[in-house]
Image: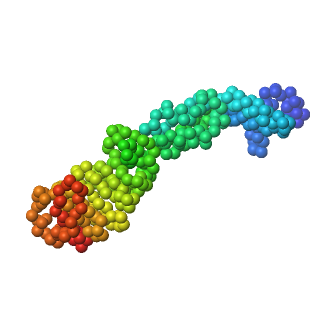
Amino acid sequence: MDVRGRAMQRLIARPSDRLRTSVSNARRDTSVRPRRRWRWTQPLLVRRFMVILLGLSAMLLLTFYVEKKDLHDSLARVRQIVASATVRAGFAVNDILVVGHRNVTEHVLLEALNISPGTPLFFVDLFAARARVEALDWVRTAELRRRLPGQLQLRVYERDPGALWQRGSSFALVDDLGQPFLEAPIQLFHHLPVLVGSGAPKAYPQLSKLLASTTQLQIRLAAAIWVSERRWNLKLDNGLTVYLPEAGVSEAWDLLVDQINTRDLFARDLVTIDLRQSGRLVIGVHPEAVWPDEIIANERALKLDSLPQKIPDGEHSPSTLAVGEHDA
């Protein structure tokens, strides 16, 4: 076929043949890319955000065009319009998740929040609502967050009661930071030690750290008396009284723990353990108490102390034995 015949054949070619030819040419030419039509593929949440953004923009524009004397009323109307648009877009409070509470009920926490269902999510004052929750006696601190599209999450960190502070005939719970936070009947918290004395809660954190290092003393402590706002007298559940010093408390405590572990003092019929003399542990026993012969004979470990032991009125005067620092 001559050149003229082939040209005529291309002119009368079917449209489908011409389309296949153009597609194959486009494939061979890598510089040509088919045009893509933009599609709205963003999630529904983004579109709702755009509605809120447009509403806020409208509010700002309106504030520039209202007269000064009507500014307050106009802003209130704009706020109402934006709130309605927010609710229609799905950003309204429909669920409040409360976590972390143990002693305070969920009902009490929700009442403190004072947030009604259907409230526009972005119109909730998180700081004011959190402050109302933290004003509750049991709550140390709280976190309040928004979770789109319509949930609030409240996480509560409660106070950890460590003792009861006795003031006359009333008792108040004291947390591990030494803060009294709630009056409570002793019957409900009889497992907690009782603090006695002015300023005892403030001094309690230091005592709590010492007790935490010695389980034997911690579980036996019945009461702690803060004497003249200077030092502690500890009353144990077996009737034993431990006199702590005003200064050098850590050293005295280490000596006490060492003697408890090495000499099993709690297995003896003791009345007092006095640590007020630096480097010495003076123990008081009832005269009728029977001690093993090896303890009495071992003068290097225990020796008679010439200092009389001060015993409250009505109690028998005990025999006194002392352990020196070099003997421990």
- What is the x, y in percent for residue 312? 24, 56
Q: Name the side, left or right, on which 192 lies relative to 271.
A: right
Residue occupying the far right of the picture: 4
Rendered position, 91 above or below 211: above
Q: Residue at x 44, y 52 (%)?
A: 177
Viewer-proximal residue among 293 and 288: 288
Q: Find residue 231 and report its image quarter.
A: bottom left
Residue occupying the far front of the picture: 313
- What is the x, y in percent for residue 304? 16, 69
- What is the x, y in percent for residue 33? 76, 40
* Quadrant the N terminus occupies: top right
Q: Residue at x 86, y 27 (%)?
A: 12
Q: Residue at x 86, y 36 (%)?
A: 67
Viewer-proximal residue among 106 and 221: 221
**Which colour style is shown?**
rainbow
Q: Find residue 173 and report its image quarter.
A: top left
Q: Find residue 95 and report its image quarter.
A: top right
Q: Name the side, left or right, on which 74 lies relative to 130.
A: right
* Quadrant the C terminus occupies: bottom left
Q: Name the side, left or right, on which 239 lies relative to 168.
A: left
Rendered position, 98 above or below 256: above
- What is the x, y in percent for residue 287? 13, 59
- Tell me, yes or no, if residue 51 can be seen here: no
Viewer-proximal residue among 278 and 213: 278
Q: Residue at x 54, y 32 (%)?
A: 111
